[in-house]
Image: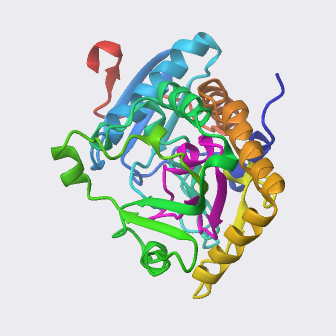
Amino acid sequence: ALCPRYFARIHEHLAPWRSTGITRRSLDRLGSMRVAILRSDMYVSAYGDCPQSRRAFSLWGLLLMLERFGDRVPDVEFVLNCKDRPIVPRDGSEVPAPVLSYCSHRLSLDIPFPDYSFWGWPEVNIRPWEEESQEIFQGSQGVEWSNRQPFAFWKGNLRMGKLRTLLARCNSTKFGTLVLDQNWIDEANIGYENSNLCKQCNQRYNIYAEGAAWSASLKYKMACGSTLLYLDSEYDEFFTKGLLPNIHFLPISSKEDMCQSLKNAVEWGNSHAQQAQNIGRTGQDFIREQVNIDQVYNYMFHLLLEYSKLQKYTPKIPKGGQVFCKRAI
């Protein structure tokens, strides 16, 4: 199968090191952990805090990628950042630190890497993507687009980022939107009965709003097959640049006219049902075909392969590093 279009951006993300290569000196102590893969064994030195269970699930994903590709994975040593935001400024520094992060930003040089949620996010009751996506795909077939509620839906933590504060103002039938706050502590106490992702496909339109940085919710929303209303965002996941406006989603203003922009999109979609439905279906197909777990592993492998070609040092076990294997989990 052909690689997804967004794989081509791997070269763009690694471009800052194309002429100089990646030196050991540039592997400073930014990030949260240093990972080395040597002869198909993985070693980890953790020196920074990671929120929740991110470290374990990110490393689990790397282990499964390593299990899949075996000795095709080159010896490589890299730094992984498990915080929300990118940490390498695009400031003209001679040799920026090569850091793998969960998202990128136009003012940063972080190298985007699949986030922990692809392997599970127990704090919000989300299972591995391979399982969760199949259930959402199947659940979405239960309600035809035309039979879904004709408004735009968003549910999540409204206390994460200025964009969501603006979005909260749009919660009105006047704008054709339903915006619900999700308190995860309360939700955990009732067994997550109101947060089942495959039951959030009952509206024709799903709104994507980033939080403090990227939001892991994008793939789940697109898997629904509802038409995605994508609020202009500052942060990108590794696959986001493969999405095309008016093909995979409808772009929505993130400025003060956000509510009117949402209203216009809902009204357009309801009066151009076939076109709006096609956008939802095309977005769902993109997620199913180009962001399935096989492609996630392919992306990880190709990124590390290209990264390894730029190394000007011999990868070694990082200081304080311990071998990381399935038994360690």
Residue at image coords 57%, 14%: 68
Display coloring? rainbow
> In this orientation, does residue 11 appear?
no
Q: Residue furthest bottom?
A: 256
Residue at image coords 75%, 50%: 277
- Is residue 68 found left or right of 273 in the rendered image? left
* Residue 12 magenta-highlighted: no
Q: Residue 149: where, in percent of width, then height? A: 57, 55
Residue at image coords 32%, 38%: 125
Which picture quadrant has residue 158?
Answer: bottom left
Is 268 in front, or is 134?
268
* Relative to 299, residue 22 above or below: below
Residue at image coords 31%, 44%: 124
Which picture quadrant has residue 75?
Answer: top right
Q: Residue 38: where, in percent of width, then height? A: 50, 19
Q: Residue 4: where, in percent of width, then height? A: 78, 36
- Is residue 318 found left or right of 184 in the rendered image? right
Q: Which quadrant would the N terminus be assigned to in this image?
A: top right
Is 252 in front, or is 146?
146
* Relative to 82, residue 134 above or below: above
Is 174 in front, or is 81?
174
- Is residue 174 found left or right of 230 in the rendered image? left
Range of magenta residues:
206-235
> In this orientation, does residue 79 appear?
yes
* Residue 233 magenta-highlighted: yes
Q: Which quadrant would the C terminus be assigned to in this image?
A: top left
* Relative to 151, residue 22 above or below: above
Q: Residue 218: where, in percent of width, then height? A: 56, 50
